Amino acid sequence: MESYNILILSVGRRVELVSCFKNAARKLKIKSLIVGCDCQETAPALYFTDKKCLLPEISSPNYIDSVINVCNLNDIALIVPTIDTDLLPLSSNKEKIESITKAKVLISDKPVIEVCGDKSKTQSFLEANDFKAPRMYIEEDLDKPQDLTYPLFIKPKDGSSSIDAFKVNSADNLNAFRGLIKNPIVQDFLEGEEFTVDAFLDFDSNIITIVPRLRISTRSGEIAKGRVIKDREIITEVKSLLSILRPIGHITVQCVKTKRGVEFIEINPRFGGGAPMSIASGADSCENIYRLLMGERLEYNEQYIENLMFLRFDSSICLNDRLEVVGHSFGDGF
């Protein structure tokens, strides 16, 4: 039986994602080794993979060669990135990796990664293609903060996970945050319902699924409570966006439904932390990945269940001094 081994990079806390790949392989009755890599041996998700390995930090000059070595040692069929800092090195070295290994890289082309990775470039892309987005202020505007209308929103141009992202309520706030945040961008603060949209596209950028999730509450920039809603306006707008951008794989789009319509905030060309919600609703990106690797052709569908609410929570595992799992905090407890 052919094996479809998956390498998940920077696996960190992505226990749910590891489980999703395992569940999809069992459902399809295929052989698949889930290999997890991280630069820290105490990354929790490593202890839920079939095999774990350590890699140097992404900034290391031998990072890509180390990824290639892991692929060849474990007969990897697909490499899955999970964090923003992995995206540009992988897209820049995609051809090299795929020529030296048997693995495909689940990564969009470099121009797509560059658009998504820089919030100002994302803004320019949205405006150039007539998509709604909060107004972004130029430096000349910010030099007269007393003339601006508040609230505003400030964030790093290359940020993620809502780190250093703040609502700005006054000129004093704005001046303070501009002194704290490196390379900030300032936009109008959007009032409305915020959605995370999980989308999946095949290796030729054909759209397979689009799943809007209402963000009921968040923690550290990641969804904590959410509801799957087949919002037709959002689905239509995201479909248009992706048809122009043409990314690859699982994509996470952030938007807000305001009085003006659907306004886009950012695009993350990777699995988001809340992706298992959409997968559990029936839009199974992990199963889709396996089917593509098996040579199947997939068609666009909306065969997922809506109005499902998901409540995320923390759990933990216990390791001994040899870093072996000796207990966990879920199920029957330690």
Image: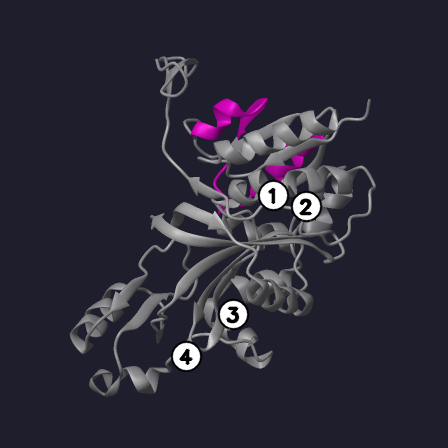
Please say whether residue 271 is visible from this viewpoint. Answer: yes
Question: Residue 172 has which mark?
Answer: none
Secondary structure at numbered mark 3: helix
43 over 255 or under it: above or below? above
237 over 70 or under it: above or below? below
Q: Give the labeled residue for mark 2.
A: 105
As drawn, is 205 to the left or to the right of 224?
A: right
x, y percent for residue 81: 57, 44
Secondary structure at numbered mark 2: strand
Marks 1,2: beta carbons within 8 A:
no
Q: Give the labeled residue for mark 4.
A: 135
**What span is in magenta?**
44-73
As drawn, is 173 to the left or to the right of 283?
A: left
Question: Residue 122 has which mark?
Answer: 3
Front tag of 4 and 2: 4
How far apart marks 1 and 3 lie (CA) works out to 27 Å
Marks 3,2: beta carbons within 8 A:
no
Marks 4,2: beta carbons within 8 A:
no
* Image quadrant where residue 174 sits: bottom left
Residue 45 within the magenta-colored segment of the rendering: yes
Residue drawn at x 70%, y 42% is 288
**Label 2 packing within 10 angstroms: few (<14), some (14-19), many (20+):** many
Quadrant of the snapshot with the N terminus = top right
Upstream in sequence: badge 1 or badge 4: 1
Q: Give the labeled residue for mark 1.
A: 64
Q: Farthest front residue?
A: 307
The number of discs equals 4
How far apart marks 4 and 2 lie (CA) works out to 35 Å
Secondary structure at numbered mark 1: helix
How far apart marks 3 and 2 lie (CA) works out to 23 Å
Residue drawn at x 33%, y 87% is 140
